Amino acid sequence: MNAPTGMRSLDDIMGDIRQHEVIHYEPDGLGGFRCKKCGAKIQQTTCTVSVHTNQFSNVCAGGGEVLQLPLPYCSSCEGMPTHTSTCVHV
């Protein structure tokens, strides 16, 4: 899974990540997850989320706050994510 894109809320971004997990992954019984399609162990990287202000229309500007969220992926079906950063506007 690549990082969700666009000027969106943090809830929307988290919702996309959770929905992806529900559709594609299942618990492996050992505290991890397996891909529902191929059975491979799910890997995880970090999604870097820059927090911007919504005071300016269509402009990414903020005070430098950054959140780090887990970003799961199947190395067999999806490969390593090529896009691991996004932003939220609050």
Image (cartoon, rainbow, N blue to C red):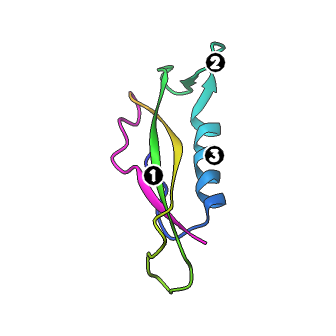
Residues in magenta, as a range: 76-90
- Give the amino acid at mark 1: Thr
Is 72 one of the magenta-colored residues? Answer: no
Within 10 Å of disc 3 (Cα), the crowding (few <14, some 14-19, many 20+) is few
Q: Which residue is mark 1?
A: 48
- Residue 64: image quadrant is bottom left
Q: Which residue is mark 3?
A: 19
Of the two numbered discs 1 and 2 on the same chain, state the one appearing first in sequence.
2
Instruction: Measure the C-alpha gap from mark 1 to mark 2.
Output: 24 Å
Predominant secondary structure, magenta span? loop
Residue at 50% across, 86% down: 57
- Pick whichever, 85 or 26, lies toward us: 85
- Residue 55: image quadrant is bottom right
The image position of residue 39, as x and y in percent, is 51, 19
Residue at 45% across, 51% down: 48
The image position of residue 88, as x and y in percent, is 54, 66
- Give the amino acid at mark 2: Gly
Residue at 46% across, 47% down: 47
The image position of residue 30, as x and y in percent, is 63, 13
- Pick whichever, 8 or 69, lies toward us: 69
* Kind of element beneath mark 3: helix
Labels 3 and 1 touching (C-beta < 8 A): no
Is 79 one of the magenta-colored residues? Answer: yes
Of the two numbered discs 3 and 2 on the same chain, state the one appearing first in sequence.
3
The image position of residue 3, as x and y in percent, is 46, 52
* Kind of element beneath mark 1: strand
Instruction: Measure the C-alpha gap from mark 3 to mark 1.
Output: 19 Å
> Between tags 1 and 2, which lies in front?
1
Vertical placement of residue 79 versus 29, above or below = below
- Give the amino acid at mark 3: Gln
Q: Which disc, if any, is residue 31?
A: 2
